[in-house]
Image (cartoon, helix red, strand yellow):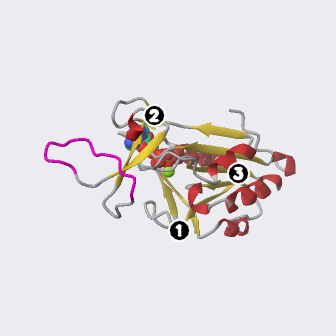
């Protein structure tokens, strides 16, 4: 992909990285952040306070990649993080920010910033997850990633929430529809295995 990182209002663009859990969205976000930093661009990385897995002050991938970030509680707080020299704003876990993030991201891109937004495009029960569909609609670039299905190894466009109990025989955990609280875990699943 050609990156145009020149200055000025026309340089703004919105890039979306979407997919289920474990698809490599954060890895891809961190890769783009590192490239911009190598090019000497000012980058602001933003995480949400609800992202308890990464913890405050960093965004982290499942594989251990991480980058320092500002942690905010809402999309409205993002524009104030932009400083003179900022060329890229990178937002991870976009689903935590709600639909308010669409207007904020568009305004930042309109103002000349490269805005990279990564997040879940699908809920654990297989439905479109706002605000990713709206962000994808107005972006210059959409990178839709898949994970690896935990059952069969095919491309996984979904993830499921599993009950916490594993049988003594090590049977595959089964998807659950209801929130079981605390003991759940998640697996990437393909179209065939998301329902069983
Ligand atoms: P995301 O942000 O989309 O949840 P991450 O970038 O945090 O994904 O992590 C991607 C990494 O997760 C992969 O490089 C791999 O090391 C690991 N991983 C664990 N389970 C899976 C899976 N089922 N499919 C793909 N990658 C997986
Ligand atoms: Mg992630």
Asked if the stretch drawn in magenta spans residue 53, the answer is no
| Residue farthest along the right direction in this orientation | 9
Residue range in magenta is: 166-178
CA gap, disc 2 and disc 1 = 31 Å
Q: Ligand 2 closer than 8 Å to the CB at disc 1?
A: no
- Pinpoint residue 194: horizontal percent, then vertical percent: 41, 39
The secondary structure that dominates the magenta segment is loop
User: Which residue in the structure is indicated by mark 3?
Assistant: 115
The reply to whether callout 1 and callout 3 are in contact (CB within 8 Å) is: no
| Direction from residue 78 to residue 125 in the image, left or right | left
| Direction from residue 94 to residue 167 in the image, left or right | left
From the image, state whether disc 2 or disc 1 is nearer to you. 2
**For the point 75% across and 41% down, which residue is it?**
140
**For the point 72% across and 47% down, which residue is it?**
14
* Figure check: 101 above or below 8: below
CA gap, disc 1 and disc 3 = 20 Å
User: Which residue in the structure is indicated by mark 2?
Assistant: 191
**For the point 21% across and 41% down, which residue is it?**
171
**For the point 68% across and 65% down, which residue is it?**
78
Mark 3: give few (<14), some (14-19) or many (20+) Cα within 10 Å.
many
191, 115: nearer the viewer: 191
- Residue 49: image tag: 1
- Pinpoint residue 163: horizontal percent, then vertical percent: 30, 53
């Amino acid at each position: 992909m050609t990156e145009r990182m020149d200055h000025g209002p026309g340089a703004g663009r919105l890039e979306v990285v979407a997919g289920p859990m474990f698809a490599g969205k954060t890895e891809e976000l961190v890769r783009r952040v590192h490239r911009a930093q190598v090019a000497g661009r000012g980058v602001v990385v933003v995480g949400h306070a609800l992202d308890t897995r990464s913890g405050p002050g960093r965004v982290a991938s499942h594989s251990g990649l991480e980058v320092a970030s500002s942690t905010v509680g809402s999309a409205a707080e993002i524009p104030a993080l932009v400083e003179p020299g900022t060329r890229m704003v990178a937002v991870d876990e976009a689903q935590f920010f709600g639909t308010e993030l669409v207007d904020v991201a568009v305004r930042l891109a309109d103002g000349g910033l490269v805005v990279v937004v990564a997040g879940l495009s699908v809920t654990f029960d297989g439905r479109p997850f706002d605000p990713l569909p709206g962000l994808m609609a107005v972006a210059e670039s959409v990178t839709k990633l898949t994970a690896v299905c935990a059952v069969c190894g095919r491309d996984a466009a979904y993830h499921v929430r599993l009950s916490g109990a594993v049988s003594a025989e090590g049977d595959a955990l089964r998807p659950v529809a209801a929130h079981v609280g605390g003991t759940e875990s998640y697996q990437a699943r393909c179209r065939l295995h998301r329902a069983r």
